[in-house]
Each structure stands twice: as C-alpha cells, then as structure tokens.
Image (cartoon, helix red, strand yellow):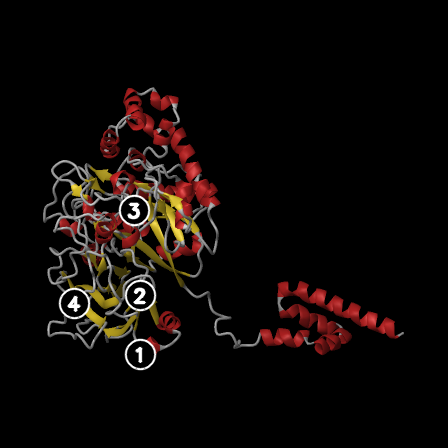
Amino acid sequence: MKFKNTLMLALVAIAFYGGWLFNQQSGVSGITEARDTNPTLQAKAEKTGYVAAVQIRNQDPHYSPVADQPLQKQVFWGDTHLHSNFSMDAFIFGNTLGPDDAYRFAKGEKVMATKGQPAQLREPLDFLVLADHTDAVGAMIALKAGNEKLLANPTLQAWSEILFAGEVDDARQLDATQTRSDTPRELEDKTIRGNAWNYLTATADAHYEPGTFTPLIGFEFTAQKGGQNLHRVVIYRDDAETAQSLLPLSPKENSDPRVLWDFLQQYEETSGGKVLAIAHNGNISNGLMFPTAELEFGDQMDSDYAARRARWEPVYEVTQIKGDGEAHPLLSPDDRFADYESWDLGDFAGVPKTDQMIPFEYAREALKNGLALESSQGTNPYKFGMIGSTDSHTSLATAAEDNFYGKHSAGMEPQADRWKDAVGGRGKFTVPGFMMAASGYAAVWATENTREGIWDAIQRKEVYATTGSRMTVRFFGGWDFTEDDLQASNMSDIGYSKGVPMGATLLQSSTGAPVFMLQTAKDPNGANLDRLQVIKGWEDSDGAVHEKVFNVAWSNPELRSMDASGDIADIPSTVDEAKATYSHKYGAAELTALWQDPEFSAEQKAFYYVRALEVPSPRWTAYDAAKFDVEMAPYVKKTTQDRAYSSPIWYEPSN
C-alpha cells in the first residue's frame, strides 16, 4: 500500500511537471487554469513549490536589474572596406589572397601575406565587409584560369602575358586601366561576374558565426567622373541567397551615384532585403563628393537628390589608408589638429587639386553645409554618421601602426623601401608610400554581433570612426543630465533613458542649452588619452554656417590648463622615433566630461560630435625604420596621434 501511494505521488508529480513545461508556451495562465480545475493538483503543486517559483519569477520588479530591459549595447569593431584578389586592381597589384583568407585573418587566424610574411591581428575583428569592386569582379581570376571568352580579346591576351609571364613593373602599369571607361567589354561578362558574386556571398555565409563573427555581404561601386573618386561601399543586411537575387551594378554601366540609389531601391523592392551605401573618403574626388549646387554628373541640387542621399547613405567613411577626411586646415584654420594625414594633391588621374575643391571633400564642412541645405531643400543630405575603414587591397584588415600591411601587395607590404615607393597617383604627381595612413576602423554600438545587429546600428548612425586605435567612446545628449549621471555605474542606461546617443537628433524641449555626457576609455593595447573635444557646427539667422572646437576634458591637469583662448598645451611626447618606442608616463586611461554649450542659441540648428585624441605614439614609418634599419628623409613624419570621431548629435529647434 505504501508503495502504491508513493508511486501515485510520483506519477502526479511527473504529470504536473510535464504539464508545466507544456504550459510555458502560454505563461502562468496555463498553470493557473490547471490548479483551478484540479484542487488535488493545486495542493500537490503548492507543496512541491512549482507555483511559488513561477509566481516569484513573474513578480515585478525582478532581482536582476536587466531582466526586463533590452539587451545592453556593446561596441563591436570592424572594417567595412576591404578588397581581396577578386578586385581587378588588387589582383593586378599582386594580391594572391582570396575571400577565405580575408575572413580567416579578420577572425584572428594567422595567414601568409602575399609576399610570404606571416600576418595576424593582435585582436580579432567582430565584423568585416569584403567590398570587392563590382566592375570586372573575378575577371582576373577567370583570365588566369584561361577563360576562352576573355582570351579571345587581343588586349586581354596581352594582359595575360604581362600578368602571368611578364615583369612586376609592367603588371603594375595595368592598374591605371581599371578607372578607364574603354576597358574591354568582356571584363563585364555577366556570367563571370555572376559566378564571382555567388562565390563571394556564399563564402561570407560560410564564415558567419552569429555572436562571434559577422561577415556582412557588400561590394564597392567605383563611380567616378574622369579621375574624380565618387566610390560607394554597399552593405547588405541579408544572406547569400537574398543578395544573389540581383547582380550588383557595375559603374561601367553608369557611374552616377543616383543610378546606384536606383539599384538599391530595386533590390529592396524585388528581394525584400535591406541595403545601404557608404560614401568613400572624399579627398580624391577633386571637389565632387559633397555638392551644394551643381551635382556630380550635371543638374542642380534639388530636394529629390537631398532626400535620396539622406535615405541611402546614412554614414560616411571619414578616414582610411588614403588619408583622413575629417577636417582640413584651409577650412578650419583655428583648429591645430585639422591637418592630420591629409591627402590633398589631386585625383586618380593626376589632376592637381585647387583650393576651391577642398570645401566639398571634408566631413566637417559637409556637416555644416548640410544644415544650410536642409533650410533650402527641406532635407539635410549630409546628416551622416562617421566610420573609418582600411580600403586595403591586401585582404588584410590591418590598421595598427605597428602591424600595418599597407595599401596593396606590390611594394606596400612591409619592406625597407615602401616609404618611398609610389602608392598611387599618375599624371602630374605621384603619391609616395610614406603618405599611407594606418587607418582606420569602424566602431558600432549594437545589442548583438549579428548581421541584423551590426547593419541596424550603422543604419541608425550609432557608430564612430577611429584611425586604428580601439578606444571606447560614449556620447549622449539630453536636457537634464547631471554630474551624478556621468559618474554613475549605469551611465549608459541613463544616457539612453534621459537622452539620445550619437547619431540621433535632439529635439528642442527647453530654451536652455542641452547637456552632453562624454566618456572615453583608452585602447588597452594603445596609447593613453590626451584630450576630449566637442566640435560644434551651426547655422545662424542669416543662413551662414560656422564651427568651433571646444576642449572639454584633458589628461595631466597638474601640467597644463586651459588658456584664455580655450586651448590646451600639448602633452610632452615620450616617443623615441629611432627605437619606435613610447611610454605611458603621460595621458589618462579614461576621460569623461559633462558639457554644455556656452554659446548655445535655441533658435539655431546645430550639430555636435566628439573628437578624442591619444598622446603621441610612433607612426608606422618609425616602426619600419627601426625594423629594417633604414634612414628616411627628414620630411617623413614618424610620430602620430591616433584619434576617434563620434557620429554627431544634431539639435533641431522647434520653430
């Protein structure tokens, strides 16, 4: 009898537990209904504690402070602009590494670079966009494999002999052909391009590890007018099957960026996917990247152009190997940090740059002009966030000064004389190797390392750029932040609940000045922090646009203070250029600030973004000189100050 009772209780418990598991699909209500209809079961359940556990679990508030909150946003690091040997120019420059190598390297694996050196990142990246050029994509690989259609063209037959049997210098001369409009049409064969696109997208899917590593499918649309660079990187939110539904547009069909926007719209409408574009660093566009009146390919600026550019291009590539594009000393003469890694010689065709071109090439000036264009066109076409990327053509996403593999494989991978070799340029000038910038990376604030999480963060502009350092930057704007909020352990939670993050718009809800919270932490493997600055741009009542740089936090206050002009003296440099070393004697591991604009006007549209600077450290040229024991020309810079640029927060008055 005792055995039977024990068995009965066990069966009841098992039955209840099974029902409890099933009823989790409908929450507590399933258990409540079971208890109400079966008093015996109710008693047994209460005795075993199941109901009590469920009730406690659904009480409000929970013990865990994040149980009812969305996932916390984290910073993820990536490169949104990298090329493999599927890009024609990368192949011609000797790159032997394909998409698989690029992903393995970004994930932290050791790979052999084209010139036979082992290469590896100190820390893996979280995401990567392999953005091979869509014009002639995969064609050089097909040519090497003996594609009959390509070899039937006498020009391509000659190319084959040069590339695979000729001298390296002869092969490099072919690079200039990529930007020409009269290249053999066989290079645009849709079968070759389609096969290449299918392989690229499938390889991206094969390397996708949600939560660990995200390959975002993408391509580069190499639009240009003559030699004026108007390139865009396109990034998909989708998987290979969706991305393969429409073959990417080639600029050989049409280089007008508006045609690219047509393609993006067509893709979304036909596939149900999502896609966006990122304008290439504009310092080789010779004044065409950020038009304010006449557009790149004729016509005049109008509301349609402004709205479509704002729709499809939410972020801008502000820094990369071909120089930095945040500011220029000609445009910002009062900003002594504006002349950083400037490339202002000319365009791809060797046409020299004039001063009149420069205002339409740099991010800060575009952000200012965007305020004025919004007043005249109804939409701000340049309301963009800022990211950095490498634009490396080596398949290696390296941006650290002491681990820099250069722009391309022929002459720019680590070797003794790459500082004086030609990295680019033709016509009336040549760009020497020492002008390469070891830059940059894209930092993304997202809830998860997935295609959806990373893409959505880029689309909403909650991103920032660095020149290679992995410093952490937080930036919030609101109306009633306090010093206690800034110092709180949950500062970011407060930032989101009481204000808006970088990339967002702060709508007027007070006549007083908004309050900004800034928080920056150093790269654990990099230099200490020197200072935090807020760059402001605004439009006055007459429609003129202005800018000002504010120093809001700095390290070593015992050594320096703000002068009457608002400037801060430079930190003492510890760089030993001959040995390529520096110390952490100066600088800070973290800098924070609670800041209000002392010149705020509630009636004026404005934007604010953070620029964070590290203390001086050795530039890649110093590491090369020490590694290879070479003496470089005295005009070659060997010290740098890596930096970060946050996406802006825009202020909109209510009128």
Residue 405 bears which disc, if any?
3
Report which residue position mark 4 lands on. Answer: 570
Q: In the visual, does 322 lie left or right of 250?
A: left
Instruction: Report the label total.
Output: 4
Give amino acid for label 4: Asp
**What residue does disc 1 label?**
482
Q: Give me the disc on residue 112.
A: none
Circle nearer the viewer, 4 or 1? 4
Residue 634 visible? The answer is yes
Q: Earlier along the polypeptide chain: callout 2 or callout 1?
A: 1
Q: Name the element at disc 4.
A: loop
How far apart, in angstroms, are the residues tagged by discs 4 and 1? 29 Å
The residue lying furthest to the front in this view is: 629
Q: Which residue is mark 2?
A: 522
Mark 2 → mark 3, Cα distance in angstroms: 23 Å
Left-right relation of 413 to 339:
right
